[in-house]
Amino acid sequence: MKMKQKVFKTSALALLCGSLLLPAGNALAAPSSREMQAMRAEIESLKRQNEALLERLERMEQGVANQDARIQAQEQQLAAQKEEAKEGEGKSILHEIGERLTIHGTIDTDLRFRRGISKEEGELRPYARDSNEIAIDAVELEIGAQLTDWAQATVVFKWEDDSFFVDEAYTVLGGTETWPLFLKVGKYVTPFGDFSTNMLQDPFTQELGELNEGAATIGYTKDGFTATAFVYNGLDRIRNDETKHRINGVGAAVRYDYEEEEGLKASAGAGIVSNIASAPVISEALEENEGSVDLVPGLNLHAGLGYGGFAALVEYTTALDNFHVDELPFKDSGAQPSALNGELAYTADLSGFETTFALGLQKTWESVALGLPEWRYSAAVGVGLVEGLTLTMEYFLDKDYDEADGGTDDDGYGFTTRLSYEF
């Protein structure tokens, strides 16, 4: 505003000076030529100053306009940064959740053909009934949460045999490189055995030794070596069709895993428990009787070896004492069931598909009352179609115990095709 006033004053001065050039009658004498030149020079100087001032004013007004535009742009940028910060905060929370949570799942769809081993009176043995069906074998969803670097929790949901249940739920503290000691508490399969297999059917060693109970384990793991000691809810008694469990089982296990960059892999382990009665087929057989259950200890030994595409495994599970004859009979005394599983496998890339060929041999002892055959011969082929999708075909042949041992001396067989999707 001051600049404009100065321009107006200059313009007025120029007009005043111009008026001096006009004739004023005889009141004043006419200026001389020198005075006229001086006045014209002054007027020209005032014009130039006026033009310079106007130009400067325009530049200042343009500067103010540019400054307003910059301020507006900065305000818009600040608003955009605030919005991005809000979005980034939401994304960071989702990212943190994604970093801490892991989700894995499996869907197994089977096409089954099976002929069971018949009893003498024509009924089917409870373990291997006849079947001819397309069925969902199992749906499994595992959710893991990495609470901290040294604490994690896992829940495994399962749908099997037309029922949905929590198969495992546990928390682990420790077990890291910096903290090799660990504590595991919850419901899970105790580290009694390994139970690895290349087949679709669960191995008999697992049927005799998998203890999926409420448990607490303390252990140490370092450089491939793992040692554990645990307590768990063992089968105690069966009364009025209700199975009672209490903390009456203790156990210990050791395991060593070795792996070289060249492809050599090896593992070996052993486990011992004070109560093996909670194993799947044993508890099912004991449910037919009421009363207290013998606390029979169990032993597991397992080993594995692999090099390149070749792999072999062997596992042995046994009761270390006899059950009562009224619970699990074998001939004229109580049974001391045991099982052995051995497998050979070879994996190769065939036309871009990872393919595994496997052969298996299983043997049981004193397991007639459990419905298990004495021998099982198995063969399986698994093909990885795409990542996470596997097609497996398995054939097995069962041979029952001799009649002299309480069996039927009969044979059974089965063929299963499974499409398994893992994510």
Image (tube, rainbow, N blue to C red):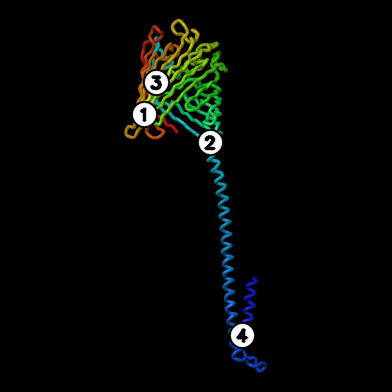
Q: Is residue 16 visible?
A: yes
Read off the residue under disc 1: 308
**Callout 3: SS:** strand
Observer-nearest of 75 and 48: 48
Q: Quadrant of the C terminus?
A: top left
In the picture provided, is 277 more to the left or to the right than 23?
left
Label 4, residues with CA under 10 Å away: few <14, some 14-19, many ≥20: few
Residue 236 percent across, percent down from the top left: 55, 14
State which tag comes first along the sequence, 4 or 1: 4
In the picture provided, is 4 more to the left or to the right than 262?
right
Please say if the residues under marks 4 and 3 sit with CB atoms less than 8 Å apart: no
Alpha carbons under labels 3 and 2: distance apart: 43 Å
Alpha carbons under labels 4 and 3: distance apart: 122 Å
Read off the residue under disc 3: 131
**Kind of residue at badge 3:** Ser
| On screen, residue 12 above or below 365 | below
Observer-nearest of 291 and 123: 291
Alpha carbons under labels 4 and 2: distance apart: 88 Å
Alpha carbons under labels 1 and 3: distance apart: 38 Å
Q: Residue furthest top?
A: 332
Which circle marks residue 100 in the picture? 2
**Kind of residue at badge 2:** Arg
**Callout 4: SS:** helix
| On screen, residue 351 above or below 340 | below
